[in-house]
Image (cartoon, helix red, strand yellow):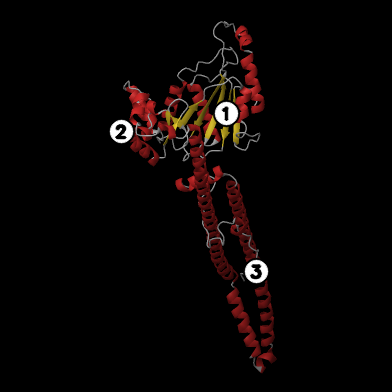
């Protein structure tokens, strides 16, 4: 985590004009969400007016709370800072709000009015915090001394608490402070070339190899870094300007480009490079997202077909067992054999049996046996029909559930596809295990086009079932 504190300001309107809109525009596409603290409104457009009113009414608040109005007047009631997470981290809104509250408490301003504005225009998740230094009840100005040290300690403890140290320089500075040493930051890209060279031309070449350049500032020679930001080299090297110029005596300092022009060229070059890198990273994330989406749909289909095949096999075994049990219970095979025997006996009856009426008795018995068999077979068919209907209903419910799961997965993927944060969350879950939104699922054939979700959606099957009897 990187906390950054601004120099403060006098106008809440100007601060919120910047934080609630895109840079240099009236649109607000970069604003992800907003949140207010210690105010009765959640509307940021009303919140800044409330904060401005509180700041202007500080004298009346002091009188109402019995505080003295003496002392230096507060010139800058606007106190703003930002909390930025590492691009690998994907904190949700609740976590960012809770962390911001802890940061405000670390500054001792937890009772003051504050507005949180999260932006999505950078690869790293970050939230801006605008705090009113005037207490809404007492009218007293909040103490913001040593706020940078407090935020540095807060960020250091936060990273230790969450198990990953992203800013090693902060840890080194903390150790130096513990030993009573100075913690002024010196850019190694400026210091190391100076320590390994003896001539000004060699130093300039070593800087260029690292993407840094010498340039003419307004009153001194400056170093332009890879992002186009000017630096005072004497501060990083801890030497005097005279010593620095003596080392550069073999360079024609008058031919160095102006810092403003060099800054603009470097910034333009850096901006173009960053845009290309951003496009490549975005395309890589999109391709990885589509591959994972195709994989989940593939796995879902395979799971559904396995479930349906398992249910079909189980129902087939149940039908076979029920048929055998009912056939044994109603003695259908025995009854059929008795009817066939009587039919053959009647057909092959002798004349003497016909004359004595024996054959007529066999016909009456055959007729009774046939009637009994038909009655038993009807009950057998009724029982089997009941079993078949239950099986058809179970299969239909399974297919309906599969269709609902397929549509839910497709809708979830389409929802995640619309936002970059959703794609990153999707990819992080795959790396760390599928825990919540998308559980592990399985399929038989991969979709024809993994990049087109419409081709990958599972279509409902027609309710046609094989005849069981």
Q: Nearer the viewer, residue 218 or 426?
A: 218
Q: In front: mark 2 or mark 3?
A: 2
Instruction: State the image coordinates of residue 408 (x, y, percent, origin top left).
Output: 60, 50
**Which is closer to the viewer, label 3 or label 1?**
1
Task: Decide: is 424 above or below 136.
Answer: below
Q: Mark 3 or mark 1: name the one nearer the start of the chain.
A: 1
Q: Which callout, 2 or 3, points at the residue further toward the start of the chain?
A: 2
Q: Mark 2 points at which residue?
A: 195
Question: Is residue 86 depicted above or below 441 in this figure?
Answer: above
Name the quadrant containing residue 403. bottom right
Identify the residue at image location x=35%, y=24%: 242
Looking at the image, which residue is at 50% across and 50% down?
284
Secondary element under disc 2, as helix, strand or loop, is helix
Residue 461 in percent (x, y) is at 63, 62
- Relative to 91, 14 lies left or right: right
Q: What element carries label 3?
A: helix
- Foreground: disc 2 or disc 1: 2
> Where's the C terminus, which quadrant?
bottom right
**Is 209 or 181 nearer to us in this picture?**
209
Q: Residues within 10 Å of mark 2 (few under 14, many from 20)?
A: few
Residue 335 seen: yes
Distance in Å between CA atoms under marks 2 and 3: 98 Å
Residue behind mark 1: 116
Quadrant of residue 19 within the rendered picture: top right
In the image, residue 111 lies at what x, y percent? 55, 19
Q: Is residue 43 visible in the rendered structure shown here? A: no
Within 10 Å of the Cα at label 1, are there few (<14), some (14-19), or many (20+) other Cα atoms?
many
Residue placed under numbered mark 3 in the picture: 381
Residue 340 coordinates in the image, percent (x, y): 62, 82
């Amino acid at each position: 985590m990187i906390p950054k504190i601004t120099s403060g300001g006098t106008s809440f309107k100007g601060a919120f004009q910047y934080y609630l809109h895109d840079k240099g525009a009236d649109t607000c596409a970069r604003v992800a969400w907003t949140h207010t603290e210690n105010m009765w409104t959640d509307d940021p457009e009303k919140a800044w007016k409330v904060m401005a009113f509180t700041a202007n009414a500080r004298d009346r608040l002091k009188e109402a709370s019995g505080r003295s109005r003496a002392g230096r007047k507060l010139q800058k009631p606007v106190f703003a800072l930002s909390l930025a997470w590492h691009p690998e981290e994907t904190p949700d809104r609740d976590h960012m709000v809770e962390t911001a509250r802890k940061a405000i408490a670390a500054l001792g301003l937890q009772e003051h009015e504050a507005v949180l504005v999260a932006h999505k225009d950078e690869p790293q998740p970050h939230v801006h915090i605008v705090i009113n230094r005037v207490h809404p009840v007492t009218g007293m100005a909040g103490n913001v001394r040593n706020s940078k040290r407090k935020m540095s300690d807060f960020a250091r403890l936060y990273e230790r608490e969450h198990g990953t140290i992203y800013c090693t320089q902060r840890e080194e500075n903390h150790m130096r402070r513990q030993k009573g040493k100075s913690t002024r930051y010196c850019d190694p890209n400026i210091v190391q070339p100076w320590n390994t060279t003896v001539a000004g031309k060699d130093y300039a070449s070593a800087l260029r190899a690292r993407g840094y350049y010498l340039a003419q500032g307004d009153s001194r020679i400056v170093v332009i870094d890879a992002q186009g930001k000017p630096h005072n080299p004497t501060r990083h090297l801890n030497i005097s300007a005279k010593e620095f110029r003596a080392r550069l005596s073999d360079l024609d300092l008058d031919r160095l480009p102006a810092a403003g022009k060099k800054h603009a060229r470097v910034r333009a070059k850096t901006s173009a490079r960053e845009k290309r890198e951003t496009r490549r990273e975005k395309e890589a994330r999109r391709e990885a997202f589509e591959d994972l989406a195709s994989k989940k749909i593939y796995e879902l289909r395979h799971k559904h077909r396995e479930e349906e095949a398992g249910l079909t096999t189980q129902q087939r075994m149940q039908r076979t067992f029920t048929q055998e049990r009912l056939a044994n219970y109603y003695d259908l095979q025995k009854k059929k054999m008795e009817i066939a025997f009587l039919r053959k006996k009647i057909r092959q009856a002798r004349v003497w049996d016909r004359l004595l009426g024996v054959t007529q008795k066999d016909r009456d018995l055959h007729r009774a046996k046939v009637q009994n068999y038909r009655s038993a077979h009807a009950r057998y068919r009724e029982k089997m029909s009941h079993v078949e209907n239950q099986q058809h209903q179970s299969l239909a419910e399974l297919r309906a559930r599969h269709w609902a799961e397929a549509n839910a997965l497709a809708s979830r993927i389409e929802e995640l596809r619309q936002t970059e944060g959703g794609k990153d969350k999707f990819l992080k879950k795959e790396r760390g295990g599928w825990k919540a939104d998308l559980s592990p699922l399985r399929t038989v054939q991969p979709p024809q086009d993994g990049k087109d979700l419409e081709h990958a959606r599972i279509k409902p099957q027609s309710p046609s079932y094989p005849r069981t009897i």
